[in-house]
Image: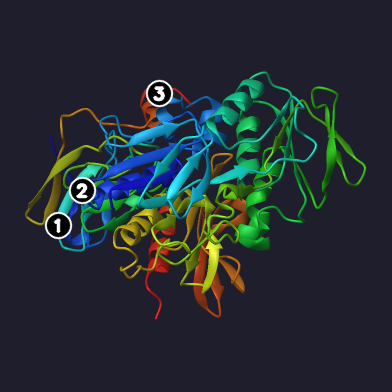
Amino acid sequence: MRTVAVVGASLAGLSAARSLRKQGYDGRLVVIGDELHRPYDRPPLSKEFLAGTVGEADLALEMDDEDLQAEWLLGVRATGLDRTDRAVRLADGREVRADGVVIATGAAARTLPGSEGLAGVHVVRTLDDARALRDELARGGRLVVIGGGFIGAEVASTAYALGLGVTVVEAAATPLAGPLGETMGGVVSALHADHGVRLLCGVGVKGLSGETRVDAVLLEDGRSIPADIVVVGVGARPCVEWLEGSGVELDNGVKCGADGRTSLAGVVAVGDCANWYDPRTGAHRRVEHWTGARERPDAAIATLLAGGAVEPGVPRPPYFWSDQYGVKIQFVGHAAGADSVTIEEGSADDRDVLAVYRRAGEPVAALGMNQPRLFTRWRKQLARPTS
Amino acid sequence: MMIPACPLADLPRGEAFRLETDPAVTVFHTEDGELFAIDDTCTHQDASLADGWVEDCWVECPLHASKFNLKTGEVDAPPAKLPVRTHEVVVEDGMVYVKLSTAAPNLPHCAVRKLAGTTA
């Protein structure tokens, strides 16, 4: 293999580039990114960076003395993959021919139809998004967050700490019920009310009002919530449009085996855009977690360099964290298959909890709120191979 | 400076002991029976490495994913970018002692603020 193109220059792409060098690949390495920035860390964008306690230099993911001997093509989007020439086509007309391709194009924030061009309406996905929102939050006012998921809740928590009046609107009856289940979704989202942040559940958003700048969020039940700033946190969609017609099978992102292989030889996919087969659950699952973007490229690169001849190991169960209102929230595993949740330590009322999810008596997931030590033990236990 | 930590008998393999020095230091007893001491605070954010995941001679921060080498203090990958200090461990008469490093610690922003006595 003489040239490898990594398409995507965020955590998954950088981790893939690192894995290539670590695993002995010494050929040409081209990293393509649609943003102008060098790889940066996204989790702080809704937390410390938004709050102003962490600056842009702190977000850099590369070490000061790190040199991957890569060609960085930044600020240019990939528009296609040509399977016969094995070439990545770029928006500026260039193309990069490569023997191996790593797809790491991530996901983009979903927006609210009809909100385009209305000032005061934000999403939080990129550094540029976060800069724009940070500048607006600094001016204060009334913030309405649409979506009570993790991004929405973190932005609400940060804005509350900055002194803004905050309302969170969530279409589902319980926020976070998808990732955490109804019971613990209710416990975690109770943090909003603890701090006087208004949470409206079970009501959809009909639209936004305002001429050039947003002035209210209109709910489906007829209410109108006044807003100076609106943040839309309604999830992300995998950035894989550029692969349509390439022969790479798409199904909720790039459909991958348990080792990151795609339907095309010499092409692997990692990070938020990749829908990997999960041997633990026997199903494909697209995981949008930071730790997946960092850990899985090792396996995908081993696959790429060996031409698919390596046996994939069982990955660690998915893990993510969130920080809200000073509470460290940690989650590992799969809540979806659980038939019971028990609080093993602490109490929900104190927002100090270690909860274990079980299916037929077997632990399948764990949630910690301010319980890093116990959580680590459960995370270890859940990572043990099952018989 | 030699600081007594704990009796070796109270620190089984796979466990960690945190010394409330300033900054805090943790002694790790690995599954292989080796003893190491490093600064307890992750260089990325205010997390206690004593709560972390130890495998071979690496400890993974309990919050994010950076791993620190218990022998050298080096970090494997972000979000942390700076190593932790390592300290010498001495066992005498069944007691574990830590000989503190005189190097400057690499503390995260929030911990530095805490040490400086201001609130975040």
Q: Secondary structure at mark 1?
A: loop
Q: Are marks 3 and 1 in contact (CB under 8 Å)?
A: no
Q: Position of residue A225 (x, y in %)?
A: 84, 35
Disc 2 crowd rating (10 Å Cα; few below 14, some 14-19, many 20+) is: many
Callout 2, which amino acid? Answer: Leu
In three-dimensional space, the C-alpha distance between marks 2 and 1, rounded to whole angstroms, equals 10 Å
> On the rendered image, what quadrant is the N terminus of chain B found in?
top left
Q: Report the mark closest to the observer, 2 or 3.
A: 2
Q: Secondary structure at mark 2?
A: loop
Label 1 belongs to which residue?
B34
Q: Chain of mark 3?
A: B
Q: Position of residue A210 (x, y in %)?
A: 85, 26
Q: Chain of mark 2?
A: B
Callout 3, which amino acid? Answer: Gly
Identify the mark at residue B117; answer none if there is no mark. Answer: 3
Q: Residue furthest left?
A: B93
Q: Chain of mark 1?
A: B
